[in-house]
């Protein structure tokens, strides 16, 4: 549905500042009905990518095709934004304050470039779309009479009312409080699945990108670093910098070798572990372990024996502190063999005290990178 080839964009020098490369030969395909999240820190180029797809920025080079139609590229007519069949949900909704909810939604129909609708048909489409986003009966209200979540639903309704080929979402939940953000993004994901929309959402929120996307596209310095499904991206990141950006990472020294079957294994402070993603060759390496993949067993429990004690085989350390988040928590453990403290994610009902002696173990396969 969306094809991007070698897309580049550079913003020129301003008042002596050096030119900035916002997009660096970006290549991306988005299938029909797919929800892709584009993740990256501020300044990585993700918003420029979205604006270029929408038609608000002109690329210096490259090609964009929507549903097989070239909308910008060498030798092709540049299709204006309102003719591209693309719906946009901007940050904080950007509703027209002087228009009613129905008029805001209807504005999308008026400016979409689709066939002209009669008054009755247009009114029916507005009502249908408002019902779809859970705002039936709100058509006569003004934006200031709505909550932040309701305003974002109106913005979504305005974007989908014309029946666009692709829907772009520009950090639409960033201004909402945490509870509302979590509930609304779940609703939006369900709605877009229901209507079979092809969607691209840009965000700097790692949790949001992983929770919503069929695939996650990670950008850095104008280029794409990795594209993959959320689990693969989180547990098998392309490099350590990306691993740390996506979440808390425990990194220890290791030594990679191949077993008798040719499969890679790594020896480290946690013992000999299977390798899920092997970067580089055999020999010295950095080992990536996620905190939730580390088991922790108090030495007091080890002394009593049992299944937990029997399976513990890693290093022994001392608890430095515990941060409680409700459903879970993170403890930091000082292990003498390691230069850095080890973070371990545990269930919230497992209290640990400062000074507790514990033994650590890793159950899962890990990733290794050249050291």
Image (spheres, rainbow, N blue to C red):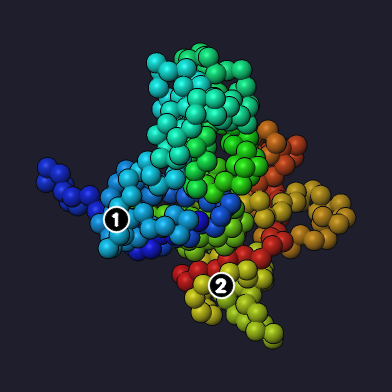
Q: Residue furthest bottom?
A: 260
Decide: marks 1, 2 in contact (CB < 8 A)?
no
What residue is at 62 percent from the left and 77 percent from the top?
264
Coordinates of residue 80 in the picture (x, y in percent): 32, 45
Q: Residue furthest left?
A: 16
Residue 336 seen from this side = no
In this rendered view, identify the residue nearer to me: 336 or 195.
195
Residue 90: assigned label = none
Coordinates of residue 298 in the picture (x, y in percent): 75, 49
**Relative side of 254 to 55, left or right:** right
Judge depth for marks 1 and 2 and give the one in front.
Answer: 1
In this rendered view, identify the residue nearer to me: 357 or 284.
284
What residue is at 22 percent from the left and 49 percent from the top?
11
Is the residue 5 above or below the residue 330 in the image? below
| Mark sitting earlier along the chain (1/2) | 1
What residue is at 58 percent from the left and 27 percent from the top?
124
Q: Residues within 10 Å of mark 1 (few under 14, many from 20)?
A: few
What residue is at 48 percent from the left and 56 percent from the top?
67
SS assignment at label 2: strand
Coordinates of residue 197 in the picture (x, y in percent): 57, 46
Q: CA distance from mark 1 to mark 2?
A: 45 Å
Q: Residues within 10 Å of mark 2 (few under 14, many from 20)?
A: many
Q: Which residue is mark 2?
A: 278
Coordinates of residue 49 in the picture (x, y in percent): 37, 50
Q: Which residue is mark 1?
A: 77
- Find residue 28 and report its image quarter: bottom left
């Amino acid at each position: 549905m969306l094809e991007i080839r070698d897309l580049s964009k550079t913003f020129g020098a301003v008042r002596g500042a050096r030119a900035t490369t916002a997009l660096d030969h970006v290549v991306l395909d988005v299938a029909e009905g797919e929800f892709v999240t584009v993740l990256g820190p501020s300044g990585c180029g993700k918003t420029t990518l979205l604006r270029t797809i929408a038609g608000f920025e002109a690329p210096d080079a490259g090609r964009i095709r929507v549903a097989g139609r070239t909308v910008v590229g060498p030798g092709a007519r540049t299709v204006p934004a309102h003719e591209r069949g693309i719906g946009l949900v901007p940050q904080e909704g950007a509703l027209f304050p002087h228009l009613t909810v129905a008029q805001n939604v209807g504005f999308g129909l008026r400016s979409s470039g689709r066939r002209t609708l009669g008054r009755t048909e247009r009114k029916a489409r507005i009502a249908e779309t408002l019902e779809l986003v859970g705002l039936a009966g709100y058509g006569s209200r003004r934006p200031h009479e709505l909550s932040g979540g309701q305003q974002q639903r109106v913005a979504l309704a305005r974007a989908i009312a014309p029946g666009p080929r692709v829907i772009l979402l520009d950090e639409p939940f960033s201004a909402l409080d945490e509870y509302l953000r979590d509930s609304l993004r779940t609703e939006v994901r369900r709605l877009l699945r229901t209507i079979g929309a092809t969607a691209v959402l840009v965000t700097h929120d790692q949790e949001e990108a992983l929770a919503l996307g069929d695939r996650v596209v990670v950008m850095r310095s104008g280029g794409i670093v990795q594209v993959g499904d959320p689990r693969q991206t989180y547990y098998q990141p392309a490099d350590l910098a990306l691993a740390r950006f996506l979440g808390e990472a425990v990194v220890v020294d290791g030594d990679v070798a191949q077993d008798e079957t040719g499969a890679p294994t790594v020896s480290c402070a946690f013992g000999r572990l299977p390798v899920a993603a092997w970067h580089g060759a055999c020999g010295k390496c950095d080992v990536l372990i996620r905190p939730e993949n580390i088991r922790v067993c108090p030495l007091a429990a080890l002394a009593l024996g049992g299944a937990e004690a029997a399976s513990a085989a890693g290093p022994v350390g001392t608890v430095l502190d515990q941060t409680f988040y409700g459903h879970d928590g993170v403890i930091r453990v000082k292990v003498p063999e390691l230069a850095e403290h080890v973070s371990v994610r545990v269930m919230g009902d497992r209290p640990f005290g400062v000074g507790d002696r514990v033994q650590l173990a890793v159950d899962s396969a890990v990733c290794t990178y050249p050291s």
